[in-house]
Amino acid sequence: MLTLQTIKADPEFVVARLAVKGFNGKEIIKKVLDIDAERRRLQQKTDSDASELKKLAASIGALKKEGKDDEAERAKARVAEIKADTKRMHDRLEECEREVHNLLLTIPNLPCAAVPEGLTAADNVVEKTGGEIPALPEDALPHWDLAKKYNIIDFELGVKVTGAGFPFYIGKGARLQRALIQFFLDEAWKAGYTEVEPPFVVNEASGYGTGQLPDKEGQMYHVNIDNLYLIPTAEVPVTNIYRDVIIPEAELPKKNCAYSPCWRREAGSYGKDVRGLNRLHQFDKVEIVRIEKPENSYAALEEMKDHVQGLLEKLGLPWHILRLCGGDMSFTSAITFDFEVWSAAQKRWLEVSSVSNFETYQANRLKCRYRGADRKIQLCHTLNGSALALPRIMAALLENNQTPEGIVIPECLRRYCGFDIID
């Protein structure tokens, strides 16, 4: 969440930047400032009363020794009055702090200066493009038909066992899925990321720490009896490793990668764009997460983009990078770059990765900080990216590499899956 100091330093700037995300922050920012002003007045009054209380307590004994019993009694009455007022003010102080905290949870992160204005995906900026779009015949099959033809993914069986959006991967389909996961993890390891295998469910505090709560509870699968959430991405447990942690400056950056299944309810998703692997309720993904000093985070963001681009180039997929406009960004992000690959049979771009810098927004929720050489404690910057999400990568690989003889497997995956063609 935004720090109170950020809002107080320049509230007009905060309101203007929130507007880039399509968020009208004028009233809520004013409410935060008004409650904080009340909190400061109460704090000043309690500090003043505490000083008076100390003086009165010291004077009562002296007044009695001097035989000034009436004055001593009046001092005692004033002490009782101050204590009662102090109790009421302390209660209100705690209430003010809760109100400010709860309001801050509902305010999105500020988009950085590089974020283009706009409200929808149509306003995103294509920043970079690579790879060659394959020339396939007009009768090229979409991946859901290829999956059925070669018996590698069974969508109907998934519906029978669980429901729509939970496919079975079968035979070479399952092996190709596992090959992609291992390839992505190995490439992340080579790039200096430490692999972790996190829990696949998290508690409420973890959801709040990375900003999934209270913003996206409707999209998360909730285990009511235990009040736990199935993770929508490994970002959540991996970033929460550093919740309530003060990291020595010498240990930064922290670079982690993790494979996990991911669960998203995708409420409201329907139509042709959700067919097959295009939008699932359960899918596999490898995530990269970085904890950085603020002055290094944008260089780290470029490294992460280069890493994802390198994966797509090794897979031989046509790709482009979008710099998202304010209205198409997530609640928590300061800037996001989406990677999309070309789906040759569907003739459309499919998102396969988002790489984001959250600056101090998540770190402030997490209390993820570092101690510098000067012993001062500061908030870290957090970043993460999909490297990569599997379903649409699988869809593009099947469609783009189809031939009359079968589906040709990219060279970089063959040693992992043990075959070079699906026939």
Image: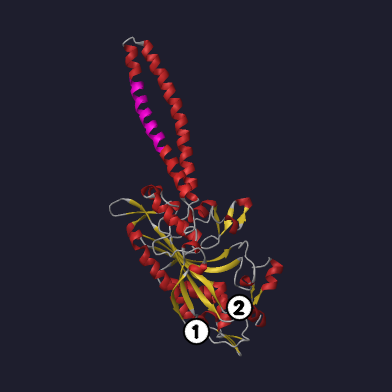
Residue 378 pos. (x, y %): 35, 52
| Amino acid marked by disc 2 | Gly
Residue with the most extreme left position: 374
- Where does the image place residue 215, in percent across and percent down from the top left? 54, 55
> Considering the numbered disc 1 on the image, is that residue within a helix, a strand or a loop?
helix
Indicate which disc, 1 or 2, sits on the residue closer to the N terminus: 2
Of helix, strand and loop, which one carries label 2? Answer: helix
- Say few, some or many: other residues with alpha carbon within 10 Å of mark 2 (under 14 / 14 to 19 / 20 or more): many
Bin the neighbour count of mark 1 within 10 Å (Cα to Cα): few under 14, some 14-19, many 20 and up: few
Q: Is residue 348 left or right of residue 335?
A: right
Left or right: 251 with respect to 108?
Answer: left
Disc 2 target residue = 173
Question: Is residue 192 rendered magenta in the image?
Answer: no
Q: How did the renderer colour the structure?
A: secondary structure
Q: Residue 251 versus residue 227: which sits nearer the camera?
A: 227
Residue extending farthest bottom? 404
The stretch of residues the image draws in magenta is 39-58
Q: Residue furthest top?
A: 67
Q: Is residue 54 magenta?
A: yes
- Give the residue at mark 1: 411
Residue at the far right: name it: 160
- Determine if residue 175 is in view: yes
Q: Position of residue 119 (x, y in %)?
A: 50, 63
Report the amino acid beneath label 1.
Glu
Up-down relation of residue 389 to residue 90 (above or below)? below
Q: Quadrant of residue 282?
A: bottom right
Q: Residue at the location (59% across, 81% down)?
A: 345
